[in-house]
Image (cartoon, rainbow, N blue to C red):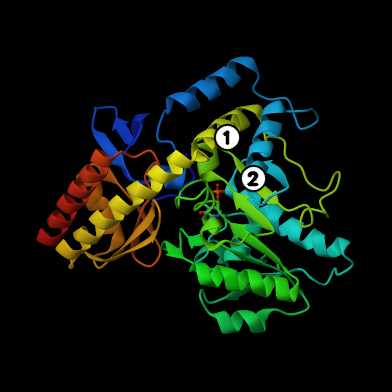
Amino acid sequence: MIPTLLPTYARAPLSFVKGEGSWLIEADGRRFLDLGAGIAVNALGHAHPALVAALTEQAGALWHTSNLYQIPKQQELADKLTAHSFADTVFFTNSGTEACELAVKMARKYWYEKDQPEKTDIIAFTGSFHGRSSAGIAAAGSEKMTKGFGPLLPGFVHLEFGDHEALTEAITETTAAILLEPVQGEGGIRPVPDQCLKGLRDLCDEKGILLILDEVQCGVGRTGKLFAHEWSGITPDIMMVAKGIGGGFPLGAVLATEDAASGMTLGTHGSTYGGNPLGCAVGAEVMDHVTDPAFLDSVNRKAGLLRQKLEGLVATHPDVFESVRGSGLMLGLKCKAANVDVVQAGYDQLVLTVPAADNVIRLLPPLTIEDDEIAQAIDRLDAAAVALSAA
Ligand SMILES: Cc1ncc(COP(=O)(O)O)c(C=O)c1O
């Protein structure tokens, strides 16, 4: 008999009743050190007092009106996002997937309005992840995500991650945009080198096509800059954001330049819940924290500390781990043992990590993780590796 919850997830037999900073707590009191942060969502940790206050204050005043009316918190968050980024304008969604939908629509509409309606193709890369909607799975293109769900949304061209030559050749008169994650998340924590991002920007400028960055997982302070692309000095035309911006409340956004957004005129897109007062109240509070230079400095310092300790862990357990990769507090441990076994061994030591493709485990802790928690994380991962080696 089918479970009453549609069985699309392989859930661990863990169930949490409370969160505190970097910790998740089960009903029996067991405390797990959370290095997954809800897959890069709880940027300020669990139950951050400022986020709890922002949400409860809004909850006591007004939950929902509609985009038929002005939503002051939405305006405030849009102003903060544009003040701190390349973008001139923002559309709010409830998730990264919905942000992907709009990014694709926006790119196509852009060319339609420029009298080049033939430009509909979006170039994307192997190993990418852009969500589970029809556009999201078509964009990622992997068999794992698309098999059985055809006919797929047409107009996506897939190239091997890192194949520069293929990229130049793949751009034709029907290309509308290039879409990529500056650091692939689900694909196994694969950063695109700064030089490549610069090259991509140049290529887009030269060919006159749009650059769409998916910063759903790597954005909002995760890499130690507000947005990951800032490390390379380039800016995109369109960017998708979600996860960390809501700190755990469902919230996403598409940010764009005035030019890139020019096709999205009155009535061309909408959402009942996107940009609702609750999400935007939390998002505005998150922004105040993650845009503080001292906060980003601390992310970078802690990222250095964690990375250094992880290198030591790899050196101590060459039979379990192979290497460390990633950017900021978006780190991956490439494993020699099966990554799912490493994640499981971590559960046994009360530390949570997240598996990814390419036999990697992801470490995406709250950006507020403290130094002694980093030390505890390493001790627990070390104990997990010892147990795995002994098995
Ligand atoms: C890079 C990237 N894009 C898009 C998505 C989809 O976001 P959501 O699950 O909020 O719809 C994800 C989710 O993991 C992601 O990592």
Q: Which residue appears at 40% of the width and 35% of the height?
A: 45
Label 1 and label 2: CA atoms lie apart by: 10 Å
Q: Residues within 10 Å of mark 2 (few under 14, many from 20)?
A: many
Q: Secondary structure at mark 1?
A: helix
Q: Which residue is mark 2?
A: 253
Q: Quadrant for residue 237, please give it.
A: bottom right
Q: Secondary structure at mark 2?
A: strand
Could you tell me the amino acid type at mark 1? Gly
Counting residues from the start of the chain, the first of labels 1 and 2 encountered is 2
Q: Position of residue 4 (x, y in %)?
A: 47, 39
Q: Which residue appears at 49% of the width and 65% of the height?
A: 144
Q: Is residue 346 left or right of residue 276?
A: left
Q: Which residue is mark 1?
A: 283
Q: Which residue appears at 45% of the width and 53% of the height?
A: 223
Q: Position of residue 27 (x, y in %)?
A: 29, 27
Do the residues bearing badges 1 and 2 touch, measured as CB atoms within 8 Å?
yes
Could you tell me the amino acid type at mark 2? Ala
Q: Is residue 116 above or below residue 30?
A: below
Residue 2 appears anywhere in the view? no
Q: Is residue 146 left or right of residue 374?
A: right
Which of the two residues, 91 or 141, is positioned nearer the viewer here? 91
Which of the two residues, 236 or 2, is positioned nearer the viewer here? 236
Which of the two residues, 389 or 5, is positioned nearer the viewer here? 389
